[in-house]
Amino acid sequence: MVSLSLGIVSCKNESKPEDTKEAAEDQNEAKFDDTSKDSLADDSEYLVAAAEVDLKEIELGKLAQTKSTNADVKALGKMMVDQHTKSSADTKTLAQSKNISLPMALTEKGQEAYNDLNKKSGNDFDKEYADMMVDGHKKTIEKMEKAAKDAKDPQIKQWAANMIPTLQAHLQHSEQVKAKVDAIK
Protein backbone atom coordinates (compact mmCIF):
# COMPACT_ATOMS: atom_id res chain seq x y z
CA MET A 1 0.00 0.00 0.00
CA VAL A 2 2.84 2.40 0.79
CA SER A 3 4.49 1.80 -2.58
CA LEU A 4 1.17 2.36 -4.35
CA SER A 5 0.72 5.74 -2.70
CA LEU A 6 4.31 6.70 -3.52
CA GLY A 7 3.67 5.73 -7.11
CA ILE A 8 0.66 8.00 -7.22
CA VAL A 9 2.61 10.87 -5.70
CA SER A 10 5.44 10.50 -8.21
CA CYS A 11 2.96 10.44 -11.08
CA LYS A 12 1.48 13.70 -9.83
CA ASN A 13 4.95 15.24 -9.62
CA GLU A 14 5.81 14.19 -13.15
CA SER A 15 2.64 15.65 -14.65
CA LYS A 16 3.55 19.23 -13.78
CA PRO A 17 7.13 20.31 -14.51
CA GLU A 18 8.78 22.67 -12.07
CA ASP A 19 8.59 26.36 -12.90
CA THR A 20 11.88 27.54 -14.44
CA LYS A 21 12.26 30.33 -11.88
CA GLU A 22 11.72 27.92 -8.98
CA ALA A 23 14.21 25.48 -10.50
CA ALA A 24 16.87 28.20 -10.81
CA GLU A 25 16.24 29.42 -7.25
CA ASP A 26 16.47 25.86 -5.89
CA GLN A 27 19.75 25.29 -7.74
CA ASN A 28 21.17 28.54 -6.38
CA GLU A 29 20.12 27.72 -2.82
CA ALA A 30 21.81 24.33 -3.09
CA LYS A 31 24.99 25.89 -4.49
CA PHE A 32 25.35 28.72 -2.02
CA ASP A 33 23.87 27.41 1.24
CA ASP A 34 26.85 25.18 1.98
CA THR A 35 29.53 27.71 1.18
CA SER A 36 30.90 30.88 2.66
CA LYS A 37 29.17 32.69 -0.22
CA ASP A 38 25.85 33.03 1.60
CA SER A 39 25.48 36.56 0.29
CA LEU A 40 25.48 35.22 -3.27
CA ALA A 41 22.36 33.20 -2.45
CA ASP A 42 20.56 36.47 -1.71
CA ASP A 43 22.17 38.35 -4.59
CA SER A 44 21.31 35.56 -7.02
CA GLU A 45 17.63 36.44 -6.56
CA TYR A 46 18.22 39.76 -8.33
CA LEU A 47 19.67 38.03 -11.38
CA VAL A 48 16.94 35.38 -11.39
CA ALA A 49 14.27 38.12 -11.26
CA ALA A 50 15.96 40.07 -14.07
CA ALA A 51 16.22 36.95 -16.24
CA GLU A 52 12.54 36.23 -15.61
CA VAL A 53 11.61 39.76 -16.68
CA ASP A 54 13.83 39.61 -19.78
CA LEU A 55 12.24 36.34 -20.94
CA LYS A 56 8.74 37.73 -20.39
CA GLU A 57 9.44 41.09 -22.10
CA ILE A 58 10.96 39.34 -25.12
CA GLU A 59 7.95 37.05 -25.60
CA LEU A 60 5.39 39.81 -24.97
CA GLY A 61 7.30 42.09 -27.33
CA LYS A 62 7.22 39.46 -30.08
CA LEU A 63 3.50 39.08 -29.52
CA ALA A 64 2.99 42.85 -29.72
CA GLN A 65 4.90 42.98 -33.01
CA THR A 66 2.73 40.29 -34.60
CA LYS A 67 -0.66 40.98 -33.05
CA SER A 68 -0.93 44.76 -32.73
CA THR A 69 -2.10 46.97 -35.56
CA ASN A 70 -0.80 50.12 -33.83
CA ALA A 71 2.59 51.32 -35.12
CA ASP A 72 3.60 52.72 -31.71
CA VAL A 73 2.79 49.44 -29.94
CA LYS A 74 4.66 47.45 -32.60
CA ALA A 75 7.68 49.74 -32.20
CA LEU A 76 7.54 49.40 -28.41
CA GLY A 77 7.37 45.62 -28.79
CA LYS A 78 10.43 45.64 -31.09
CA MET A 79 12.36 47.86 -28.69
CA MET A 80 11.51 45.49 -25.81
CA VAL A 81 12.67 42.45 -27.76
CA ASP A 82 15.93 44.14 -28.81
CA GLN A 83 16.75 45.72 -25.44
CA HIS A 84 15.75 42.76 -23.27
CA THR A 85 17.68 40.35 -25.53
CA LYS A 86 20.78 42.47 -24.86
CA SER A 87 19.96 42.70 -21.15
CA SER A 88 19.45 38.94 -21.02
CA ALA A 89 22.91 38.36 -22.52
CA ASP A 90 24.51 40.70 -19.96
CA THR A 91 22.66 39.00 -17.10
CA LYS A 92 23.66 35.53 -18.33
CA THR A 93 27.32 36.56 -18.57
CA LEU A 94 27.33 37.88 -15.01
CA ALA A 95 25.42 34.86 -13.72
CA GLN A 96 27.86 32.46 -15.36
CA SER A 97 30.82 34.28 -13.81
CA LYS A 98 29.18 33.87 -10.37
CA ASN A 99 27.96 30.28 -10.99
CA ILE A 100 24.35 31.44 -10.61
CA SER A 101 21.55 29.47 -12.31
CA LEU A 102 18.90 31.41 -14.21
CA PRO A 103 15.50 30.45 -15.65
CA MET A 104 16.02 29.44 -19.27
CA ALA A 105 12.39 29.52 -20.39
CA LEU A 106 9.31 31.58 -19.72
CA THR A 107 8.12 31.06 -16.14
CA GLU A 108 4.57 30.03 -15.21
CA LYS A 109 3.81 33.66 -14.32
CA GLY A 110 5.25 34.85 -17.63
CA GLN A 111 3.29 32.25 -19.57
CA GLU A 112 0.07 33.33 -17.82
CA ALA A 113 0.72 36.95 -18.77
CA TYR A 114 1.40 35.90 -22.35
CA ASN A 115 -1.76 33.79 -22.55
CA ASP A 116 -3.91 36.56 -21.03
CA LEU A 117 -2.53 39.14 -23.46
CA ASN A 118 -2.89 36.79 -26.43
CA LYS A 119 -6.65 36.49 -25.76
CA LYS A 120 -7.09 40.20 -26.44
CA SER A 121 -7.26 41.93 -29.80
CA GLY A 122 -7.39 45.38 -31.33
CA ASN A 123 -7.27 48.36 -29.00
CA ASP A 124 -7.90 46.10 -25.97
CA PHE A 125 -4.67 44.27 -26.80
CA ASP A 126 -2.76 47.53 -27.26
CA LYS A 127 -4.02 48.99 -23.98
CA GLU A 128 -3.25 45.81 -22.04
CA TYR A 129 0.25 45.56 -23.52
CA ALA A 130 1.02 49.21 -22.75
CA ASP A 131 -0.33 48.79 -19.20
CA MET A 132 1.81 45.67 -18.70
CA MET A 133 4.93 47.49 -19.90
CA VAL A 134 4.35 50.45 -17.57
CA ASP A 135 3.53 48.30 -14.52
CA GLY A 136 6.30 45.79 -15.21
CA HIS A 137 8.98 48.40 -15.64
CA LYS A 138 7.96 50.24 -12.46
CA LYS A 139 8.33 46.98 -10.49
CA THR A 140 11.61 46.07 -12.18
CA ILE A 141 13.09 49.51 -11.49
CA GLU A 142 12.23 49.08 -7.79
CA LYS A 143 13.98 45.68 -7.74
CA MET A 144 17.07 47.04 -9.48
CA GLU A 145 17.24 50.05 -7.15
CA LYS A 146 17.11 47.63 -4.22
CA ALA A 147 19.83 45.47 -5.78
CA ALA A 148 22.01 48.52 -6.48
CA LYS A 149 21.69 49.49 -2.82
CA ASP A 150 21.58 46.13 -1.01
CA ALA A 151 23.51 43.58 -3.07
CA LYS A 152 26.59 42.27 -1.26
CA ASP A 153 28.55 41.40 -4.41
CA PRO A 154 30.08 44.57 -5.93
CA GLN A 155 29.68 43.33 -9.52
CA ILE A 156 26.00 42.53 -8.99
CA LYS A 157 25.52 45.90 -7.31
CA GLN A 158 27.14 47.65 -10.30
CA TRP A 159 25.17 45.55 -12.82
CA ALA A 160 21.91 46.60 -11.14
CA ALA A 161 22.92 50.27 -11.05
CA ASN A 162 23.78 50.09 -14.77
CA MET A 163 20.35 48.61 -15.57
CA ILE A 164 18.34 51.43 -13.98
CA PRO A 165 18.78 54.16 -16.67
CA THR A 166 17.75 51.76 -19.47
CA LEU A 167 14.75 50.56 -17.50
CA GLN A 168 13.74 54.17 -16.79
CA ALA A 169 13.93 54.91 -20.53
CA HIS A 170 11.73 51.85 -21.18
CA LEU A 171 9.23 53.09 -18.60
CA GLN A 172 9.14 56.56 -20.15
CA HIS A 173 8.62 55.14 -23.66
CA SER A 174 5.94 52.75 -22.34
CA GLU A 175 4.12 55.64 -20.64
CA GLN A 176 4.16 57.64 -23.89
CA VAL A 177 2.72 54.72 -25.85
CA LYS A 178 0.14 54.08 -23.09
CA ALA A 179 -1.02 57.73 -23.27
CA LYS A 180 -1.45 57.47 -27.06
CA VAL A 181 -3.27 54.13 -26.87
CA ASP A 182 -5.49 55.28 -24.02
CA ALA A 183 -6.53 58.32 -26.09
CA ILE A 184 -7.93 56.03 -28.80
CA LYS A 185 -11.62 55.33 -28.25
Image: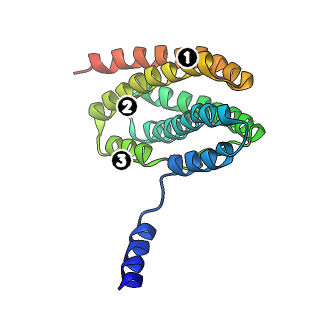
Q: Callout 2, which amino acid? A: Tyr
Q: Earlier in the sequence, mark 3 or mark 2?
A: 3
Left or right of 180? Residue 160 is right
Q: Nearer the viewer, mark 3 or mark 1?
A: 1
Residue marked by disc 2: 129
Residue marked by disc 3: 115
Q: CA distance from mark 3 to mark 1?
A: 29 Å
- Up the image or down, 4 lies above or below 12; here it is below
Mark 3 crowd level (few <14, some 14–19, many ≥20, 10 Å Cα):
few
Q: Earlier in the sequence, mark 1 or mark 2?
A: 2
Left or right of 49? Residue 182 is left
Residue at image point 70% right, 38% down: 95
Q: CA distance from mark 1 to mark 2?
A: 24 Å
Q: Callout 3, which amino acid? A: Asn
Mark 1 crowd level (few <14, some 14–19, many ≥20, 10 Å Cα):
some
Residue at image point 36% right, 47% down: 115
**Where's residue 161, x and y in %?**
64, 16
The quarter of the rendered structure image containing the C terminus is top left
Q: CA distance from mark 3 to mark 2?
A: 12 Å
**Where's residue 43, x and y in %?**
62, 31
**Where's residue 34, x and y in %?**
68, 46
The quarter of the rendered structure image containing the N terminus is bottom left
Which color scheme did the rendering employ for the protein? rainbow
Mark 2 crowd level (few <14, some 14–19, many ≥20, 10 Å Cα):
many
Asked whether disc 3 touches disc 1, contact meaning CB atoms under 8 Å apart, the reply is no
Q: Is residue 143 visible?
A: yes
Please, what secondary structure does the residue beneath circle 1 have? helix
